[in-house]
Image (cartoon, rainbow, N blue to C red):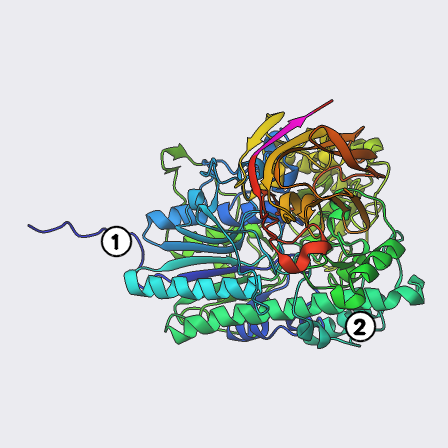
Amino acid sequence: MRWPAEPKRLPEDAPNILIVLLDDVGFGVSETFGGEVHTPTLSKLADQGIRYNSFHTTSICSPTRAALLTGRNHTRVGSGTIAERAVAFDGYTGVIPKEAATLAEVLKHYGYRTSAFGKWHNTPATETTAIGPKDRWPNGYGFEYFYGFLAGETSQWEPRLVENYNFVEPPNDDPTYHLTEDLVDRALDWLDDHRAYSPDKPFLMYWAPGAVHGPHHVFPEWADKYKGKFDSGWDAYRERVHQRQLAMGVIPPGTQLTPRAETMQAWDDVPAEERAFQLRLMELYAGFVEHTDVQVGRVVSGLEERGLRDNTIVFYLFGDNGSSAEGQRGSISELLAQNQIANTVDEQIVALERLGGLDALGTAKTDNMYHAGWAWAGCTPFRSTKLVAAHFGGTRNPLVVSWPNQIRSDKVVRQQFHHVVDIAPTIYELLQIAPPQSVNGHEQMPIDGVSMVYTFSNAEAACQKQEQFFDNNGSRGLYRDGWFASTFGPLTPWINAQKGLSEWDSARDVWQLYDLRNDFSQATDLASRYPEKLAELQSRFVEVAKDNQVFPLGAGIWLRLHPEDVKRPPYDHWTFSGKTRRMPEFTAPGLGKQSNRVVLDISVEDAASGVLYALGGAGGGLSLSMEKGCLVYHYNMMIIEQYVARCSQPLAAGTHRVEVITRIARLGGAGTVAILVDNKQVAAVDLKRTTPVAFSASETFDVGVDLGSVVSASYEGRRPFEFSGVIDRVEVELID
């Protein structure tokens, strides 16, 4: 008997593929592209390969990832906004359809071994529970192994981790732990398994650590490298970087430095008493970027040590969008911006002092993000930042490609206009794979991207990409044959608690026109000079937008106006055991934003202690705990406001019924919390305001413990502060 030979579907010596995708880092950050942050790995790979200065993303997280993995435009595959802001419009559901098979799914069928590490952010936020459904988790999209987190961000110190289909916890008491380093260790372990079990197979590894998305968490020694480096502020940073980019040839001669938006604060207008705060936030970001790039270097070194590097093509995408302005005026709790909660820098600094001052920044105590001015500086020489699709500050990211066996390195910067949708077709061409018409019984939609292979051996080749549309939060644009027409839209990311979004009328938007052949940085608006060209591109945008499910325009901001429409479970009553763990906030009862009643049946000994339940984490959340028998309710309103109710007498040993009744008149409004024990009120607290959308992106609802980062600093050193009594049952109901 002879087993049939395994079919060969790939060219001889098909390369291994490593796709590295960083998060929230703009064009002008890395020293490789003229910035002031040390990036030795990006520079090494650029020296060993080729670099691009006109590569684009979608200006936001989930959409870029969906486009990268499928080769289709983001709205065409239901990813017009981040997973947590999904709404019931076709282009914005947060669901990548099976008719748009991912690169991993296709390559798996051709014989590749596939893995993904780090941030996913392409599963609907209501489908991330232990009970599923799980067909839209990474394993359901072609990755045979996944280790990372499903949400848009997580703490680097206490990440909410998933391994394949199971939740896992990082070590509780390891002061050397950092998520990005953990992701390297896991990736190298997987490579060892691959070499042991399938050494004849090529692999695809998608390594997307989630760094340097907020919170900006890094060991202080990395940030300390940058002390004093940014003391002159963000305006001066841009001027220095612009001159360096010109000198290095990263940008074409004559490229102009675009001005600061009138709505963005100048460094000279930052009060002296705030500057230490703003500078430390930037030092932490810079240290985080360098630390992340060094971890990429560990992955690359791991390939070298295993003899895999020469035949591995590395795509190093330095950012899934431009640097993020979501820290607005500097923040110790970045989801203040997502919740549209008004705040001041003074409030931030006062709250920070309670946590230990500047030394608390970058630690598990804060979810810190830098001032939007630093994000704008990180996008030099372009206008705007992440969340803006009209300007390249939001969409233009460095790209380096390195493949020692096949790509001859050179120093000529590739200037062809390309987009993240072009990565998948590039790989298909390299492997001589025609994009399949059917995958797993699902007829496939066409690929939108254009292969970049023609640029590998010819830096001066004429651009083969004629058209690309952009859209995010109503900010939109169209590239066509060297021209770019765009309009800013209603949302200004760096304005705190922006008003007037509901008054936006897209028909009144003012469009701009740029000739990119002579204007690399979008410095000169030619709309008044060439009205016919502008009208032509505007008309074409409408056609392309219809084809790509972009309408209704601005659907990405819907939940900012209508937080009540956030997708949530269809329940108004839940029953939990004392062992309920890791229920993601977007699937949990809205304890901090809706009126509700929580009833717990518990049994305690004298002086019982621990957490009865918790939702959220250090950046924002609520918990009910017990300290030596005394009940303590804590509402952490995004760090800047703390509300505590504490009973005066400890509970006697025995069984008790505890009720927590919360009444909140409207989303984000004031509220009251009353605590009852055996039908008698024992404590209460008024909430001046509440969190309308979410406390966090990845923290969870837990019974009997507070997993992840802790809601209350009062038990921080005792994490996860497991309850010493017995919780028989927890009933939660939403009430009017």
- Magenta stretch? 729-734
Instruction: Decide which of 639, 513 is in the foreground and name it.
Output: 639
Magenta stretch: includes residue 732: yes
Residue at 73 percent of width and 31 percent of height? 594
Residue 316: assigned label: none
Q: Secondary structure at mark 1?
A: loop
Identify the residue under disc 2: 230
Other-residue count near label 1 (Cα within 10 Å), few / some / many at <14 / 14–19 / ≥20: few
Report if residue 669 is visible in the image. no
User: Of label 2 and label 1, which has the lower sequence position?
Assistant: 1
x, y percentage for residue 124? 56, 38
Report if residue 513 is visible in the image. yes
Q: Amino acid at mark 2?
A: Phe
Q: Amino acid at mark 1?
A: Lys
Identify the residue under disc 1: 8
The prevailing secondary structure element of the residues shown in magenta is: strand
Figure disc tally = 2
Magenta stretch: includes residue 655: no
Instruction: Decide which of 626, 653 is in the foreground and name it.
Output: 653
Q: Is residue 77 left or right of residue 649?
A: left
x, y percentage for residue 410? 54, 74
Q: Secondary structure at mark 2?
A: loop
Can you tell which quarter of the image residue 716 is in? Answer: bottom right
Residue at 40 percent of width and 54 percent of height? 114
Q: Is residue 60 left or right of residue 326?
A: left
Q: Rounded to the nearest whole Å, what is the CA distance between mark 2 and mark 1?
A: 55 Å
x, y percentage for residue 22? 59, 59
Residue at 75 percent of width and 37 percent of height? 692
